[in-house]
Each structure stands twice: as C-alpha cells, then as structure tokens.
Image: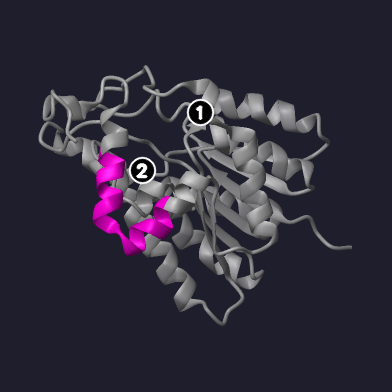
Amino acid sequence: MTPNKVALVTGASSGIGRALCIQLAQKGYFVAGLARSIDKLLDLENEIKKLNSDFLPIQGDVRLESDCKKFIDITTEKWGRIDVLINNAGISMRALFDDVKLEVIHELMNTNFWGTVNCTYYALPHLLKNKGSLVGVSSIAGYQALPARSGYSASKFAIHGFLNTIRIENIYTGLHVMIACPGFTSSNIRNTALTADGSQQKETPLEEGKLMSAEIVASRIIKGIEKRKRQVVMTTEGKLTVILGKFFPSFVDKLVFKDMLKEKNSPLIKKYPYGKN
C-alpha cells in the first residue's frame, strides 16, 4: 500500500497557509503546519479532522533555526517522510528607507529569507529522497523592487536567489523547486505589515474586495506543484511586470512608482507631496 504523501506548510495559522493546509488535506496529504499561534493551529486541526485527514499542529517561529529543525524532526518521526515543503510564512512592511529603523529590515529578512533557509536546510534530505517539491511563496516584489517596501523586496529577491540556486544544484536529482507569486491577496499580511518604527500598520491601504482570495492562491500553488512548474505568477499585471522589467526596466520603475504613489496614505507622499509626472 502506497503511504500518504506528507506536506509541510509554514505560516499555517491564517491566510494562504491555512488554505493550503485544508486543500492539501482534501487531496489526501498528511499535513504538518507550523505557526506561532497554537490556538489557531488547533482550530485548523479540528477543521481538517472533519475531512478525515491527519494534521500535525506544531507551534514555532521560522526565525528560530531550532524551531525549524523541530518542525522537520517531529514530522518525520510521525510519518517518516516529507514530499512537499511550502515556505509560506512571511511579513511585509511599508515605509521609506530614509525613515525605517534597521531592526525592521532585520525582522523582514529573519522571517522571510532566513525562515525559508532554515526550514529548507533540514527538510532537503527528505525531499531529495522522495524527489519532492520545495516551494517558496514569494511576490512580484522578488522580481521588481517596490518603493516603500525595501526590506520586503530585498527578502523576496533573496528568496528567489536562494531557491533558484537550490534548483540548479539539484538539476539532476529529481527535486522540484517552485517559486509562487500571488497578486495582492486578502489575508492578514498587510494588516500586520510593519511601519517605519516596527509597529503594525493595522489598516490596509488596499480595497479588500478587489484582492485575490487565499483559497484561489492556495489552489494555484497546489496545481503548480502537481505540474511541477518552475514558477507560478498569478496575475496578468504580475506577468507583464516580470516580462517588461527584463527589457524596459526604467519604464517599469516609473510605472511602479506612480502606482505606489497613488496608494492610500502612501509613504512616498512625504518625498513627493505634489506628485511626479
């Protein structure tokens, strides 16, 4: 009898991570989820139990190497294998670099980049054994720098460089590496985005009704895993940004600047109070 495949998801307690756990369970995976909130993980466990599937809630922080190792160790002790690792945990920011405290940039890198590195380091031997999938949930900010999001863009560029390197190092091992780039998604990440002093912005500048749902994003990520895609860019605007940015970088920089300047309470207004044509 073929054993169930095992998928691990970081940032599992809400948003895209939660949706991924539920949809993976629906597809028959055994799922382990890592997050800082054990209460939210236990609520998720109760929901997945209704699907007659197994879910392993593990409290931890991806910024801590020891917690990432624990995540992998507990999962492999329980199920003996890892087939999919989805590095989903992440935070955002919104502030001009002129104003931001350096600890905010460190926080972005520690969560987004080092969290991905930490979990990948301990999961990789198991993924290689099963010719599994290594996934990073990223952003167009990993292809195109976004003003007022220096730490966020830097962390996503770093993730892309890291995962692309892992892909090339394992080009003949059977390992699947995928970078997933959703559009703006209806999730908690923007409400918890850090401001210049490290506090949470709480109020999103975007219209929630126009954003992608976490469920749609999760579905597209899972389809990408099934098809063993190299990357999944989920919006037309994102695809155009990636393509045009390769050939017309200065033009795209100006378009992105104008778009970000129009955001509600944009930090760019401080530098450009009368706008910029």
Q: Nearer the viewer, residue 76 or 268?
A: 268
Q: Quadrant of the C terminus?
A: top left
Q: Report x, y in % for residue 146.
A: 29, 43
Amino acid type at image mark 1: Ser
Q: Nearer the viewer, residue 162 or 157?
A: 157
Q: Residues within 10 Å of mark 1 (few under 14, many from 20)?
A: some
Nearer mark to the viewer, of 1 and 2: 1
The circle drawn on residue 111 is 2
Kindly state the secondary structure of the residue where label 2 is placed: helix
Q: Report x, y in % for residue 6.
A: 69, 53
Quarter of the image holding residue 198?
A: top left
Task: Please indicate whether residue 24 sits to the left or right of residue 230 in the image.
Answer: right
Task: Please indicate whether residue 165 sits to the left or right of residue 35 in the image.
Answer: left
Amino acid type at image mark 2: Thr
Residue beneath the point at 32% across and 49% down: 155
- In the picture shown, does residue 14 fall above or below 234? above
Task: Please indicate whether residue 31 sits to the left or right of residue 154 in the image.
Answer: right
Residue wearing tag 1: 187
Region rendered in magenta: 241-257
| Residue 58 visible in rendering | no
